[in-house]
Image: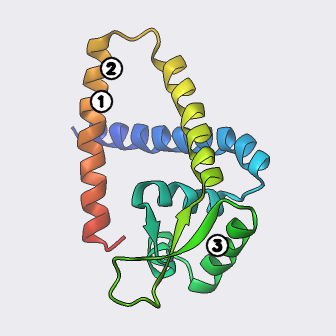
Amino acid sequence: MVKDINNHIEFMKEFLNDINTLLARLSVKIREEYQVSKEQANVIRMLEHEKAMSLTEITERQGVNKAAVSRRIKKLINAGLVQWDKSEESMDQRMKYIKLTELGKQFNIESKQVMSDIVGNISNDLSDEQIEQARHVLEIIDQRLKQVNIENNF
């Protein structure tokens, strides 16, 4: 039983490594086209899900210092991918948020298309049932990862 668990753990490590390697290599082309770093691309993807975020929120999510995030944001603003936005909803009108521009949204659309193409190629010979089974297991893993992130304040 322990040997099986160790094999499963090794497989998951290899699987996650393969995914990260593939994503990194695929994203290089689009990042070069938009002239953004991997860290800047992460900010752009974050903003898609959160709509607008403060510098502090981005800093906390990326786990780096505020100066590093400020430099990333400045470069993204200069590239026309994000912009500062004063929130109408905030009580503190001094609070500024960063949001995507149309160009930043286009970056995310193109990034997603690359992923869709890869997923289509990888899964084209699987049955609908196999795809549903895989999705079910991946959803369970995803929920557990999210819980670990919450428990560890990530």
Classify mark 1: helix, strand or loop. Answer: helix
Q: Which residue is labeled 1 in the image?
A: 135
Which quarter shows the C terminus? bottom left
Q: CA distance from mark 3 to mark 1?
A: 35 Å
Comparing 109 with 149, the one in front is 109
Determine crowd level at label 1: few under 14, some 14-19, many 20+ residues with C-alpha closer than 10 A: few
Q: Residue at x 61, y 69 (%)?
A: 83
The kind of residue on which mark 1 rests is Arg
Q: Which residue is labeled 3 in the image?
A: 73
Q: Is residue 4 above or below residue 130?
A: below
- Marks 1 and 3: in contact by CB < 8 Å? no
- Indicate which label's residue lies in the foreground, 3 or 1: 3
- Marks 2 and 1: in contact by CB < 8 Å? yes
| Nearest to N terminus: mark 2 or mark 3 | 3
Q: Which residue is labeled 2 in the image?
A: 131
The kind of residue on which mark 3 rests is Ile
Determine crowd level at label 2: few under 14, some 14-19, many 20+ residues with C-alpha closer than 10 A: few
Residue 94: image location, x then y, percent: 47, 91
When asked about the image quadrant of residue 70, the answer is bottom right
Comparing 83 with 60, the one in front is 83
Residue 147: image location, x then y, percent: 24, 60
When asked about the image quadrant of residue 60, the answer is bottom left
